Image: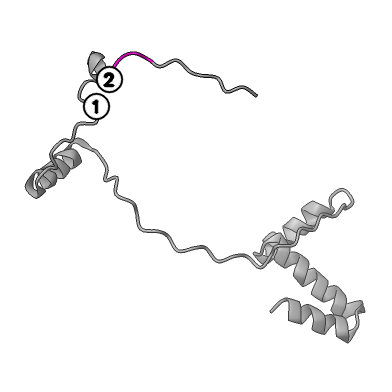
């Protein structure tokens, strides 16, 4: 592909009044001026724009595997009501129900396996 030559703009930044003075260095404020600016800004309601302290990272949940099941009408509400009665979330209600089922009809190996997973 042929390289296209671009035409050069024939003006300098100083020739445009709105761009005059761009890039000029302003003197840094003295510590007293800086302190006074901050105090006056606080009086007017301006907030500090300094970076805030980083928050500690939240602890990752051990509940990472999705499980989507289909149930009969009314079962979901019953399940959620049971969890609300126990004061726990759905995932904990499910684990408790699974433990009860294993204790009633499962094998000792399944019970041990579940206990290892729940640690």
- Judged from this view, the residue extending furthest toward the front is 2
Q: Judge whether residue 7 is colored magenta.
A: no
Q: Position of residue 116 (x, y in %)?
A: 75, 81
Q: Which residue is mark 1?
A: 22
| Residue range of the region highlighted in magenta in the rendering | 9-13
Q: Pointers 1 and 2 in contact (CB under 8 A)?
A: yes
| Mark 1 neighbour class, 10 Å CA radius: few under 14, some 14 to 19, many 20 or more | few
Q: Quadrant of the N terminus?
A: top right
Q: Quadrant of residue 13?
A: top left
Give the image's coloring scheme.
one colour
Q: Position of residue 37 (x, y in %)?
A: 14, 41
Q: Secondary structure at mark 2?
A: helix
**Disc 1 to disc 2, C-alpha distance:** 9 Å
Q: Position of residue 110 (x, y in %)?
A: 86, 80
Looking at the image, residue 34 lies above or below residue 10: below
> Which residue is rendered at x = 33% and y = 51% of the image?
51
> Which residue is rendered at x = 69% and y = 63% of the image?
85
Between label 1 and label 2, give the one nearer the viewer: 2
Q: How many marks?
A: 2
Q: Quadrant of residue 95?
A: bottom right
- Most foreground residue, 90 or 118: 118
Residue 13 image label: 2
- Most foreground residue, 8 or 59: 8
Looking at the image, residue 97 lies above or below residue 53: below
Residue 50 relative to residue 71: left or right = left
């Amino acid at each position: 592909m042929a390289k296209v030559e671009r035409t050069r703009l024939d003006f300098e930044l100083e020739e445009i009044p709105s761009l005059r003075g761009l890039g000029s260095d302003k003197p840094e404020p003295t510590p007293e001026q800086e302190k006074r600016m901050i105090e006056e800004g606080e009086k007017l309601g301006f907030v500090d724009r300094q970076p805030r302290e980083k928050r500690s990272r939240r602890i990752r949940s051990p509940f990472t595997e999705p499980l989507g099941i289909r149930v009969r009408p009314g079962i979901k509400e019953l399940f959620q009501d049971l969890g609300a009665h126990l004061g726990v979330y759905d995932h904990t209600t499910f684990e408790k129900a699974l433990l009860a089922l294993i204790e009633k009809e499962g094998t000792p190996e399944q019970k041990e396996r579940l206990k290892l997973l729940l640690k």
